[in-house]
Amino acid sequence: MAKYSDIKGFTVQTLSTDTVASQVAGGAWASGGDLNTGRGQGGGTGTQTAALYFGGDPVGSNGALNEEYNGTSWTEKADLNTGRGNNLGGAGTTTAALGFGGYGPSSTLANNESWNGSAWTEVNDLNEARQALGGCGVSTAAMAAGGQPRPPQTANTELFDGSSWTEVNNLNTAREELCARGTTTSAVAFGGTPPITGKTETWDGTSWTETTDMNTARSALDGAGDSSTSALAFGGTTGSNSALTENWDGSSWTEVADLATARTGAAGAGTSPLAVAFGGNTSPKTQTEEFTAPATFNQIQEGQLFFNSTANAFKETITDIPGATWASSGSLNTARYGLMGGGTQTSAIAAGGSIDSGPPTAPITTDTELYNGSSWTEVNNLNTEREFPQGAAASSTAAIAFAGYDSPNNLAINESWNGTNWTEVNDLNTARRYLAGFGTQTAALAAGGLTSTGVNNVETWDGTNWTEVSEINTTRYALMGAGTTTSAIVYGGQTSGPTYVDNAETWDGSSWTEVSDLNETKGYMGASGTSSTDALAFGGQPPPNGLATTEFWNGSSWTELNNLGTARSILAGAGTTSSALAFGGYSTARVGTTEEWTANLSNKTITAS
């Protein structure tokens, strides 16, 4: 029998496990030694093989208990001087630790105690008494963040220098039942309530910065980690006990292996590759679990082919678009709908649109904002205010915005953006609104739209002039599209009825061909994509409050995928099918919400027919 390498010219690597995106992605939880006394909402600190768990609920019987873990079993140690629970803060090691805040038998506490390996000693209190706070650091350099002194929650942050606490810059979002991990110069705070949130903030020693949210919002969670760029979040509540575990790499959260026991009010210690989780509420839990990531692992790479000897299967690594999800990011500074958008997920532009709370009266804006992958910044405005323009952009520094409506007139105006200013350039041949537009600053396409009725006109832009080319087959407006001037697709919209349609057509640079329809009839969508065989359609309407659905076009059919977090219509989009951006739009009112669509690499089994 011929060898595979003789047929294909290369050898397939044999691996015992699938390739993974990172060391932590290859990790898993395993059982450790049980606590002597089950309890939740205590303070935890230390490492996977040397951890401390002190305090806990119910306060009356468990609140002063202290146990030490050696990587195998727990041993009871000297109790706290002041019994307490409800997520007191902890910092340090098994020989030098701090326990601060929490809730005592009848009140919220500011008490701070120092552990020397054998006994607890009362030292200087927090400036603000609070419970359900986040704590991290070491015994001589600790942090207390957020919590509840009394309703409402606090955003206060305090640092301990080994002698006293000093108030520093607050969290951006006040909350309780959050988790904080890291040091006094490099930390991350995540989760919390109310409401239950996935908000994440990083600390640089001076101030907190909002960054990418967790994939699953939750409170009463815990975690492990040693800096603002490396943390693990596990357990908590989403409304019910959770076993979810997510890894933070400094820019995004990735779901990894779940806990074996779902729990809320657990405590944690260690680092993201080597963590330990213990205790928890609801039939107070004694279980301890250890998370271990392999020191040696096979890195995932797109396009690789390998044989998994354990699973006895050939596998290929691909971009898993069907497995992609939407995650919240920084909102527009000016909430609006009917805006122009374009660029990439990390370099996008938004311009124009309506800033009213809803039709029919709609104040129009010229505002322009640029997105850097996490937040929007206001820059120089369009020269002509308008709503429902379209645009094309390779990035936030090179774009055009064309057509639109200034009530009562349809517009043919075209403006070019150089990263600093907008300049008027040659107009479209047909003034209109509700059209589809995409491409780049020097090679764009405009299709369909509304004048006094729907039109089927198509024009291409070469960087200097617009030229009329072959018309789309179905006359419509409120359609959307993606691609280039030589390979594109348009879909959905309204006919002059007005009736919503699901039609889709592809463009090969000279003519349009009808292809498989969308799964639902709709218009006023957001879009992203690169060609006639690769596009996303998200959001849209019919009314009343817009759609959340996302559909993926693979060149032959549409597939419904994960929904937007916020249902809406008349929104803007940017990016590709594996890395997209949705922003602005109309729900029950105008919104500034931004969401990122991200597809990770995935190992897929190859099946032979």
Image (spheres, rainbow, N blue to C red):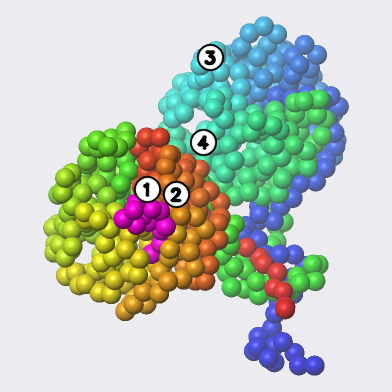
3D distance between C-alphas at marks 1 and 2: 8 Å
User: Is disc 3 in contact with disc 4, using a CB cutoff of under 8 Å?
Assistant: no
For label 3, the residue is 151
Residue at the far top in the pictured view: 106
For label 4, the residue is 199
Category of crowding for the residue at label 1, using alpha-carbon neighbours closer than 10 angstroms: few (below 14), some (14–19), many (at least 20): many
x, y percentage for residue 242? 70, 37
In which quadrant of the rendered image does the C terminus lie?
Answer: bottom right
The disc labelled 1 sits on which kind of residue?
A: Leu
Residue drawn 72% across the image and 45% down it: 258
Element under disc 2? loop
3D distance between C-alphas at marks 3 and 1: 37 Å
The disc labelled 2 sits on which kind of residue?
A: Gly
For label 2, the residue is 539
The disc labelled 3 sits on which kind of residue?
A: Pro
x, y percentage for residue 382? 18, 49
Residue drawn 51% across the image and 16% down it: 152
Residue drawn 55% across the image and 37% down it: 198
User: Is disc 1 in contact with disc 2, using a CB cutoff of under 8 Å?
Assistant: yes
3D distance between C-alphas at marks 2 and 3: 37 Å
Magenta range is 490-501
Residue drawn 75% across the image and 26% down it: 281
